[in-house]
Image (cartoon, helix red, strand yellow):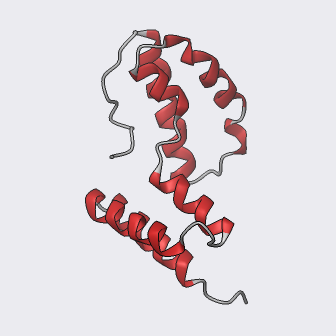
C-alpha cells in the first residue's frame, strides 16, 4: 500500500471543492498550496498544481480569441480519444471536444458550457 501523500490529498480536495461549485474557494486553496510548495517543491506536486491552476485547453483558447484554425488541435485531440477512460472524465472530455468542434465550425467565440470555470 502506498503511503498517504498529504499534498496530493489537499490538491484533490481543492479540485473536488471546485467541481462541487466553489470555484473561488478551490482556486484559493490551490494558490495557497502553490505558495506552500514553492519553487523547490516536489516536481510532481508542482506539475499537478500547475495543471489544475491553468486552463490547458489550447484549442478552446485559440477559438475564443477568434483564431479558428484551432481545428488543427481538435483533429489531434480526436485522434487520441481512444486513450481516454470509459468513465465520467472521458465522457466530459469527449463532450467538450464535440461542443468545441461545433463552435469552431460555426465561428463562435463565446464561452462554452463545457469550459472549466475560472
Residue in the picture at 32% in, 29% down: 111
In which quadrant of the rendered view does residue 103 lie? top left
Q: Is residue 3 above or below residue 22?
A: below
Residue in the picture at 60% in, 24% down: 74
Q: Position of residue 63 (x, y in %)?
A: 45, 20
Judging depth in this view, the residue of 76 and 61 nearest the camera is 61
Q: Position of residue 44 (x, y in %)?
A: 67, 66
Residue in the picture at 54% in, 84% down: 6
Question: Which quarter of the rendering shows the N terminus?
Answer: bottom right
Left/right placement of residue 94 relative to residue 84 reads left
Residue in the picture at 57% in, 47% down: 90
Q: Position of residue 108 (x, y in %)?
A: 35, 14
Left/right placement of residue 45 relative to residue 16 reads right
Q: Is residue 5 above or below residue 106?
A: below
Left/right placement of residue 73 relative to residue 19 reads right
Q: Position of residue 50 (x, y in %)?
A: 54, 55
Amino acid at each position: 500500500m502506498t503511503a498517504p501523500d498529504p499534498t496530493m490529498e489537499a490538491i484533490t480536495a481543492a479540485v473536488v471543492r471546485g467541481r462541487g461549485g466553489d470555484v473561488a474557494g478551490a482556486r484559493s486553496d490551490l494558490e495557497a498550496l502553490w505558495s506552500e510548495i514553492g519553487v523547490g517543491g516536489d516536481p510532481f506536486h508542482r506539475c499537478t498544481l500547475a495543471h489544475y491552476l491553468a486552463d490547458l485547453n489550447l484549442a478552446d483558447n485559440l477559438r475564443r480569441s477568434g483564431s479558428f484554425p484551432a481545428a488543427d488541435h481538435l483533429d489531434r485531440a480526436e485522434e487520441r480519444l481512444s486513450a481516454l477512460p470509459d468513465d465520467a472524465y472521458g465522457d466530459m472530455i469527449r463532450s467538450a471536444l464535440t461542443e468545441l468542434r461545433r463552435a469552431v465550425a460555426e465561428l463562435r467565440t463565446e464561452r462554452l458550457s463545457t469550459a472549466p470555470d475560472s
